[in-house]
Amino acid sequence: MTNKTLTSCLGDLDFTDGTVFDACANTDEEFKLIKKNWRKKVLAEHPDKGGDPDKFRTTNASFEVLRDLYQQSKVKDGTYSSYLSESAKAEAAESDIDIDELFTKYSKNTNVPSWDFYEEAAEEEVPGYKVETARSGRAKCTVCKKNSGKVAIADSAAAEVSTAIVATSTASRSSSRAKKSASSAVVKQNDTTVIGLGEVRVGSFDKMAGSYGRWHHLECWRVPKKVQNGLTDPSDEESCLRDLLSMEEVLLTGLAAMDEEDQMTFVRHVINSDHWAGNRKRKAGAASGPSKAKSAKVASKSESASKAAKGGKKKSAGSTANVVPGSYSILAPGLGGAVDDE
């Protein structure tokens, strides 16, 4: 038994006087103030900076208890100051929720993300990302929509070329309508942009709109560096889940409200380094080796061809005196030895 109360949890974050919340209009603003104090304390108490690990865990555990209360809308009378009144302090055992089990669970968490993780998290006033299951089945994936747009443009261009061949000047207006209908039909038929009802999706916070948007299919979401830095052991699913839940209302929101199956679906996506932002560049860099080797081979062949030409070897049919070794010439149909397509 820890005999912890919500009053003592607030005390761990340096809140001892309820008047500190007087300027706050609602619980949301009060929690932002709590989060601000928590950030300052964990940066100062972090073991990487010589802080006491036990004190650091206590600060984190108290914050997570207060965060749970906020997420579940269980703050007494809608204000944290209700736990700091003189009567609340005197009657803590009666007025506070029994949080021993919850506090113990959080305080036993030995996962300690790096100091850099907390420093980056301190820059976020509002969680940057939201994970949830799609509630309507109408939202579209930002990545798929962008890729679909490219395909639609190509399909539309092909349709225009085809229509131009068979269209007549007198039927241009009806032909235009037909092209639009055909293009629309192609897009609808191949529409993979919609995030299905119940699918796990991830969105980002739009500061201009003040809400979450730019939704992604989970498989299209690249795990940001900030989230990566908070994973203490990406090889362990349970450890990763604890890490991600500790990011609730800091970098992420919504994960705690999901059922266990969907939570683990999200966890497995996050721990797969193929989904990490930045890995795409490294893959491209790794692929440059073979590409360079291939270029060297082409250059070698071009050099050999050049020497052969200088040596007076017989030219092949269709070659021209103006062709530079190693270059590529596109021959027009029926000219320069090319076969007429007709």
Image: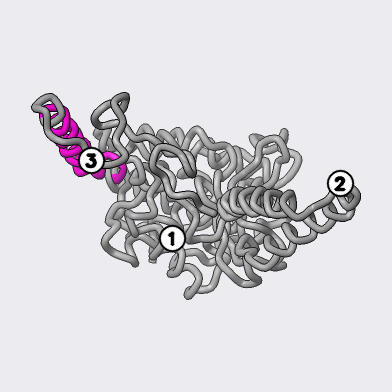
The mark lying in front, picked from 1 and 3, is: 3
Residue 103's tag is: 1
Q: Could you tell me which quadrant the C terminus lies in?
A: bottom right
Along the viewing direction, whichever of 98 and 316 lies nearer the viewer: 316
Q: In which quarter of the image is residue 196?
A: bottom right
**Residue 290 part of the magenta segment:** yes
The answer to whether residue 88 shows anywhere in this view is: no
The answer to whether residue 256 shows anywhere in this view is: yes
Question: What residue would you read off at disc 3?
Answer: 316
- In whole angstroms, how far apart are the C-alphas of marks 2 and 1? 78 Å
The mark lying in front, picked from 3 and 2, is: 3
Label count reads: 3
Residue 29, position as x, y percentages in the image: 67, 41
Question: What residue would you read off at disc 2?
Answer: 169
Residue 145, position as x, y percentages in the image: 62, 53
| Mark 3 crowd level (few <14, some 14–19, many ≥20, 10 Å Cα) | few
Residue 255, position as x, y percentages in the image: 53, 61
Q: Which amino acid does label 3 sit on?
A: Ser
In the rendered view, tell whether residue 246 sits above or below residue 277: below
Q: Could you tell me which quadrant the N terminus lies in?
A: bottom left
Q: Earlier in the sequence, mark 2 or mark 1?
A: 1
Residue at the left extreme of this rendering: 311
